Amino acid sequence: MGLTDVLHFMYGVENNFKRFRIKDMKNEKTLILIKHDGIQRSLIGEIIKRYERVGLKLVGAKMLVPTSELIESHYTVDPEWRRKTGEKTIKNYREKGKIPPSEDPLVITGIVLEGLKKYFITGPVIAMVWQGAHAVQIARKITGGTEPFSSADIGTIRGDFALDSYLMSDKDGRVLRNLVHASTSPEEAEKEIALWFRPEEVIKYKLAQDEILYKPSLEGFLG
Ligand code: ADP
């Protein structure tokens, strides 16, 4: 085997690896929860429609009343969640020229987590697994920023159908009512899905539209 053969061989291996990774991309999964306020606002159909029409595939769905243990595990799958969520709250207050409820992010999230546990057990949620290329980021984009009042743009679920703010929720000692949860990274999604779904509840199937979304060539449709 000469040097050219070796280089050709390595090039082929690298290309196959790239192809495999790209093929895998369309299987990215994210966890979406329609929270209690989304259900009470009769927005189930509207919310599902938004994830569906972009091209994501629904591969798991159920309605349940979560336990506070499930909610605690869900929000702490990311060990950095407490810090990040507290810092986000403080930044939001500062941007509005307001004084945050505490200067310590962990104090804020301590209160938020207790609030989330109390809130989630008050009614059912619809838990869903959506699959597709860039599923996590696409779903976050459709969902919108955490605070409906300022960080969720118009055109997103939270921006179009909710009006809550940190100021209102913190003043009332409750969590933000922002209709949905969407995972923030593929790694987090994997852990969250494992909490809410047994492996056999996530269904592997083909959709007719998969071809239009992902097939490299669109030849063969005429005729
Ligand atoms: P997201 O849901 O956008 O991923 P986070 O993970 O930071 O946002 O927070 C989880 C949920 O906790 C939010 O959707 C919201 O309902 C609630 N929440 C977060 N921070 C606060 C806060 N400072 N006050 C009230 N509720 C909050």
Image (tube, rainbow, N blue to C red):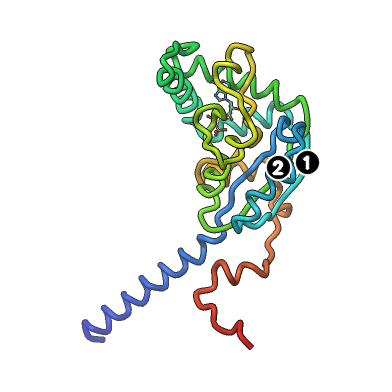
Outermost bottom residue: 223
The local secondary structure at tag 2 comes to strand
**Disc 1: CA contacts within 10 A as few (<14), some (14-19) or many (>=20):** few
Q: Nearer the viewer, residue 193 or 222?
A: 222
The local secondary structure at tag 1 comes to strand
Disc 1 and disc 2: Cα gap in Å? 6 Å
Residue shown at 71%/34% (left/top)? 38
Residue shown at 71%/27% (left/top)? 120
Residue shown at 55%/52% (left/top)? 135
Q: Nearer the viewer, residue 155 or 126?
A: 155
**Mark 1 in CB contact with mark 2 (< 8 angstroms):** yes
Q: Quadrant of residue 220?
A: bottom right
- Amino acid at circle 1: Met
Number of disc labels:
2
Q: Which numbered marker is on residue 63?
A: 1
In the rendering, at what x and y percent does residue 68 appear?
70, 26
Left or right: 216, with 7 as reference point? right
Query: Quadrant holding ligand 1?
Result: top right
In the rendering, at what x and y percent does residue 51 appear?
63, 50
Q: Nearer the viewer, residue 201 or 157?
A: 157
Quadrant (top left/top right/bottom left/bottom right) for the N terminus: bottom left
Left or right: 44, with 21 as reference point? right
| In the image, the residue with mark 2 has its CB under 8 Å from the nearest atom of ligand 1 | no
Q: Earlier in the sequence, mark 1 or mark 2?
A: 1
Q: Quadrant of residue 52?
A: bottom right
Quadrant (top left/top right/bottom left/bottom right) for the C terminus: bottom right
Residue marked by disc 2: 127
In the rendering, at what x and y percent does residue 123 appear?
78, 29
Residue shown at 61%/39% (left/top)? 157
